[in-house]
Amino acid sequence: MSVRNWHIGLLIFTLFSCDSFVLKKENKEDMVKEGLEKLNWNEVDQPPLFDACKSKSEELLKQCFQNTITQHINSYLTKQTFKVKKTINDTIWVPLLITKEGEIILEDFAPPYEIAIQIPTLKINLEKSINSLPEVKPAHTRSTPVTSRYKLPLVIHIN
C-alpha cells in the first residue's frame, strides 16, 4: 500500500468519523426537564413567607411561618365554644398544602375518633381559620415558586 493510498484512507476515515466528535446542542426543554427531575422538591431554599416574617433572618423564616400559622389557628379556635363530655388532652397533626400560587389548603384530614366525636365541628373550624390566614408567598426553590407540604402540630387541651 502506497503512502498516497494511506493518506486518502486516513482522510476518508477522518471525514466520516467527524460526527462522533461534534458536540450536539441539547434542546433547552430537555435540559430544563432533566434539571427538574434531579431537583429534590422536598427541600426548599425559602419557605413560604408571610409579610410579618419578611424582616426575619433566613434561619428564622421557617419558624416564623410555623409560628404565624399556629398563633392564628390558636387565636381562632380559642374564640370558639366547645362543649365536651370528657377532658381532651391530645396533639393532632394538621396537613397543609401551600400551592405555588400562595394558596393554603387543609389537605385530607380526619381528627382522631375520640376528638371527632366530642368536637364534630373541629375540621370546619380549622378550614375557616386557615382560610382567614393573611396572604402568603409560596416556597421557592432556585428562585422558582413551588408547592410545599407542611404538618403542623395542634395541641388540644379542653377540660
Image (tube, grey):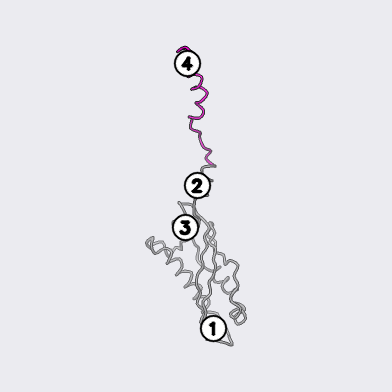
Looking at the rendered structure, which numbered label has been put on residue 43?
A: 3
Question: Is 7 within the magenta?
Answer: yes
The residue pinned by badge 1 equals: 88
The residue pinned by badge 4 equals: 6
Q: Nearer the viewer, residue 25 or 58?
A: 25
Q: Amino acid at mark 3?
A: Glu
Mark 1 or 4: the one toward you: 4
Q: Amino acid at mark 4?
A: Trp
- Secondary element at image label 4: helix
Residue 30's place in the image compared with 43, above or below, is: above
Of label 2 and label 4, which has the lower sequence position? 4
Instruction: Using the numbered discs, state the Cα–Cα distance from disc 3 to disc 2 in whole angstroms.
Output: 15 Å
- Answer left or right for 110 relative to 8: right
Of label 4 and label 3, which has the lower sequence position? 4
Instruction: Using the numbered discs, state the Cα–Cα distance from disc 1 to disc 2 in whole angstroms.
Output: 48 Å
Q: Position of residue 113 (x, y in %)?
A: 61, 78
Q: Residue at x 57, y 87 (%)?
A: 86
- Answer left or right for 40 relative to 114: left
Of label 3 and label 1, which has the lower sequence position? 3
Residue 88's place in the image compared with 57, above or below, is: below
Instruction: Using the numbered discs, state the Cα–Cα distance from disc 4 to disc 3 in whole angstroms.
Output: 60 Å
User: Crowding near pointer 1: few (<14 within 10 Å), some, many (20+)?
Assistant: some
